[in-house]
């Protein structure tokens, strides 16, 4: 059985704002195993990035971790000192951010930026630092690494800059890699290249990956398991095939219905009506109830627990209560899944 690498237990995070307290992450729990990829999916403001920044201990001063534990190989990183965390951050857990230009120093040659990371986290000779720098540039697909290591970030394309960021992050062989929307700023072909690169590097390094995205199409290509977040909470979690082939939460139905396809004949997307609630003033009951066409009376009074669908699949919806009426998922959902997975199977993606 694969080794348990990371475990988040009952994590709650809040923001102190002028208008009040925003509960950005609410009682979130999940696990991550060695060489596994967990995708965290949801609309903007659902709590995805805040959850992962808490795992890195990279939160602003007006943010507090109200409860929970984050165990990395059994060590609760929320309880260690900042000095200890600086050693853990980069060595054991690392993060790729959305925009590579915010992670690269525009005034420093890219080879030096990788060498600086190695010098900070690894006690190796200057010769070994340079060797590893060139090795990682080659590993992420930068051609002629010796020549290009002497160049500045502006001399590279967006996709190449993201590859350089990945090289910097992977240079210290982290056990857990957090990828926060790493393909958002890239075109479709470059997105596919970066995803393939991450999968290939994972096979070579045994790294575990937390992949943050709002795009379920990306998830199907990269993830082993999927956690769907809404209003700061995980509302569905399971293996990627379970969440795609047998989704149970109406919000997941909405995300799948809104997923675009690449068919020649354009089909209208089915958007989720309404907007996410304010985390400053969550409504009573289920926060998704005002947008849910299948809302039950109980949804307006009580927030649902995570009901088990299988040993690995859970969903927080009162529709799974034995007393609830049986509801048929929307027809568009079956069409979207058939279209998407038909292409995936054709290309050997699953």
Image: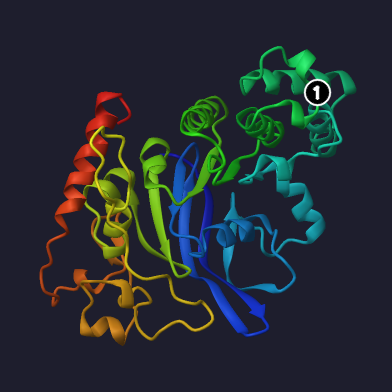
Q: Quadrant of residue 61?
A: bottom right
242 horizontally vs 109: left or right: left
Q: Is residue 57 visible?
A: yes
Q: Is residue 196 above or below residue 184?
A: above
What residue is rendered at 22% in x and 71% in y? Answer: 293
Q: How far from the left and from the top, in percent, is residue 226?
A: 39, 50
Q: Could you say whether the residue bearing mark 1 is in a helix, strand or loop?
A: loop
Q: How far from the left and from the top, in percent, is residue 317?
A: 27, 70
29 horizontally vs 117: left or right: left
Q: In which quadrant is the N terminus drawn?
A: top left
Instruction: Tell me the crowding category of disc 1: few under 14, some 14 to 19, or many 20 or more residues within 10 angstroms, Cα based.
Output: some
Q: Is residue 304 visible?
A: no
**Front residue (pair 326, 265):** 265
Q: Quadrant of residue 2?
A: top left
Q: How far from the left and from the top, in percent, is residue 59?
A: 69, 63
Q: Is the image coloured rainbow, by chain, by secondary structure, or in one colour?
A: rainbow
| Residue assigned mark 1 | 151
Q: How many marks?
A: 1
Q: How far from the left and from the top, in percent, is residue 216?
A: 37, 47
What residue is rendered at 61% in x and 40% in y? Answer: 175
**Front residue (pair 190, 269):** 269
What residue is rendered at 68% in x and 35% in y? Answer: 165
Q: In which quadrant is the C terminus drawn?
A: top left
Q: Is residue 24 above or below residue 216?
A: below
């Amino acid at each position: 059985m694969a080794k348990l690498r990371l475990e988040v237990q009952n994590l709650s995070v809040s923001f102190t704002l002028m208008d009040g307290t925003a509960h950005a992450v609410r009682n979130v729990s999940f696990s991550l195993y060695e060489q596994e990829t967990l995708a965290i999916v949801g609309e903007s403001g659902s709590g995805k990035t805040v959850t992962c920044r808490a795992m890195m201990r990279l939160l602003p001063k007006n943010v507090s971790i109200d409860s929970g534990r984050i165990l990395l190989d059994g060590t609760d990183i929320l309880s260690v000192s900042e000095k200890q965390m600086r050693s853990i951050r980069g060595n054991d857990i690392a993060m790729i951010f959305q925009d590579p230009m915010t992670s690269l120093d525009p005034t420093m040659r890219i080879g030096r930026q990788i060498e600086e990371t190695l010098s900070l986290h690894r006690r190796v000779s200057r010769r070994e630092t340079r060797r590893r720098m060139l090795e990682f540039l080659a590993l992420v697909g930068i051609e002629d690494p010796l020549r290009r290591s002497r160049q500045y970030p502006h001399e590279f394309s967006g996709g190449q800059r993201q590859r350089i960021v990945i090289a910097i992050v992977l240079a210290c062989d982290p056990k857990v890699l957090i990828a926060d929307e790493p393909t958002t700023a890239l075109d479709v072909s470059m997105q596919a290249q970066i995803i393939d690169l991450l999968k290939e590097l994972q096979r070579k390094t045994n790294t575990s990956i937390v992949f943050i995205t709002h795009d379920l199409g990306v998830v199907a290509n990269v993830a082993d398991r999927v956690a769907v977040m809404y209003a700061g909470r995980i509302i569905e979690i399971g293996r990627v095939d379970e969440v795609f082939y047998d989704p149970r939460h109406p919000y997941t139905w909405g995300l799948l219905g809104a997923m675009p396809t690449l068919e020649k004949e354009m089909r209208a997307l089915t958007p989720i009506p309404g907007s996410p609630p304010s985390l400053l003033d969550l409504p009573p009951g289920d926060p998704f109830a005002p947008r849910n066409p299948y809302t039950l009376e109980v949804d307006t009074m009580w927030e649902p627990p995570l009901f088990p669908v299988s040993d690995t699949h859970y969903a927080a919806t009162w529709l799974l209560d034995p007393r609830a009426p049986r509801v048929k998922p929307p027809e568009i959902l079956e069409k979207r899944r058939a279209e998407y997975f038909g292409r995936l199977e054709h290309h050997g993606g699953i």
